[in-house]
Image: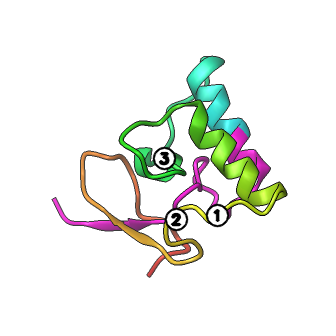
Amino acid sequence: GSATFFLRANCNGDDKVDISDAIYSLGFLFGGGSAPPCADACNSNGDPTHDISDAVYTLSFLFTGGPPPGTFPECERSTPPDGDCAAEACP
């Protein structure tokens, strides 16, 4: 498959990074919420797994001056099978 581009920390797929992304991530991990449209985007801290640390990383970036997720605000390359990672915000 071909590569697509995604915005790291845009867990809910709405093409922006805000508190709703952390809430979506936690809902999926612990509340039986829907799977993210792009698994790579939910991995805010860029480590090998999507877990609670990703929501904490996003919240730290948004509210306490923590480091940006990945190359934010630039998009990153993703390859299948990571879901629909073709973010509208990316070229």
Instruction: Measuring from the top left, give residue 38's x and y in whole percent.
Output: 44, 49
Of mark 3 and mark 2, the one earlier in the sequence is: 2
Q: Quadrant of the N terminus?
A: bottom left
- Percent position of residue 20, x then y: 75, 46
Kindly identify which numbered label has been placed on residue 7. 2
**Disc 3 to disc 2, C-alpha distance:** 10 Å
Q: Nearer the viewer, mark 3 or mark 2?
A: 3
Earlier sequence position, callout 1 versus callout 2: 2
**Whole-number angstrom distance, CA of label 1 to CA of label 2:** 15 Å
Q: Which corner quadrant of the image does residue 24 belong to?
A: top right
The amino acid pointed to by label 1 is Pro
Magenta span of residues: 1-22
Q: Secondary structure at mark 2?
A: loop
User: Residue 67 shows which numbered tag?
Assistant: 1
* Residue drawn at (58%, 55%) of the image: 9
Kindly identify which residue carries mark 3.
Answer: 43
Give the main secondary structure of the magenta stretch.
loop
